[in-house]
Amino acid sequence: MLSDERMDQIIHHYGKDILAHAHMDIERRSMQHGDVTTYDHSLRVARLSVKIADRLRLWNHVNLRALVRAALLHDYFLYDWHDYDNGAHRLHGFRHPYTAEANARADFQIDDIVANSIRTHMFPLTPVPPKYLEGVIVNIADTLSAVCETVGARLPRRGHAPAAGKRRCRCRRADRRR
Ligand SMILES: [Fe+2]
Ligand SMILES: [Fe+2]
């Protein structure tokens, strides 16, 4: 079972150029869910994707490099979706996988596993399911992360005691690792 530190090493090994790209500054400035930026959300999805592959012993079935890169790039749409469509952002959910794929193709060399996983990460909101196991994992990790971040934003912050009987959201722990 991989440690959190080892999983972070794997993500930085396979995603170093993505994390260092100048366009990631846009992700660092853009909010995704609650007070979580798109950059932190993408890192969380990458960590969770690697964790799922590890805990389900899928090492012989996944392309780890493609898994990490698809997870880091799945929301590479490069704008703050709150501003999309003059603030209406009704179509963002449907369109952003295609924008993310186009941006990823423009900035990086991506193979079909990565491209398909980015394009299908919002399934079933978008009509076509992932073609590869890597895409299924990213889809699940993204959904779990989105729920965690959205619910986590409504729970007490670190340093504030949770209300009696309430547990602190585990998502906050991931934010402390960069
Ligand atoms: Fe997304
Ligand atoms: Fe996402």
Image (cartoon, rainbow, N blue to C red):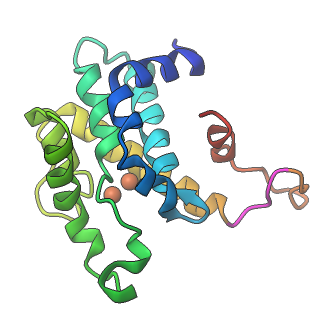
From where the camera sits, is residue 155 visible?
A: yes
From where the camera sits, is residue 130 visible?
A: no
Stretch in magenta: 154-158
- Considering only vertical position in the picture, is 17 above or below 99? above
Q: Is residue 73 left or right of residue 38?
A: left
Q: Residue 145: image x %, image y %?
A: 49, 49
Please tell me how many numbered marks the rendered image carries.
0
Q: Is residue 130 left or right of residue 23?
A: left
Compare residues 77 and 58 and report the one nearer the observer.
77
Residue at the (20%, 46%) spot, across then down: 104
Q: Residue 156: image x %, image y %?
A: 80, 60
Compare residues 115 and 139 and report the one nearer the observer.
115
Compare residues 12 and 122 and report the one nearer the observer.
12
Residue at the (81%, 56%) spot, across then down: 166
Q: Quadrant of ligand 2?
A: bottom left
Q: Quadrant of the C terminus?
A: top right
Q: Quadrant of residue 105?
A: top left
- Considering only vertical position in the picture, is 45 above or below 6? below
Q: Does residue 138 show up magenta in the picture? A: no
Q: Residue 134: image x %, image y %?
A: 24, 32
Specify the principal SS of the magenta part: loop
Q: Does residue 156 show up magenta in the picture? A: yes
Residue at the (37%, 15%) spot, across then down: 57
Residue at the (50%, 53%) spot, across then down: 28
- Considering only vertical position in the picture, is 11 above or below 108? above
Q: Quadrant of residue 52?
A: top left
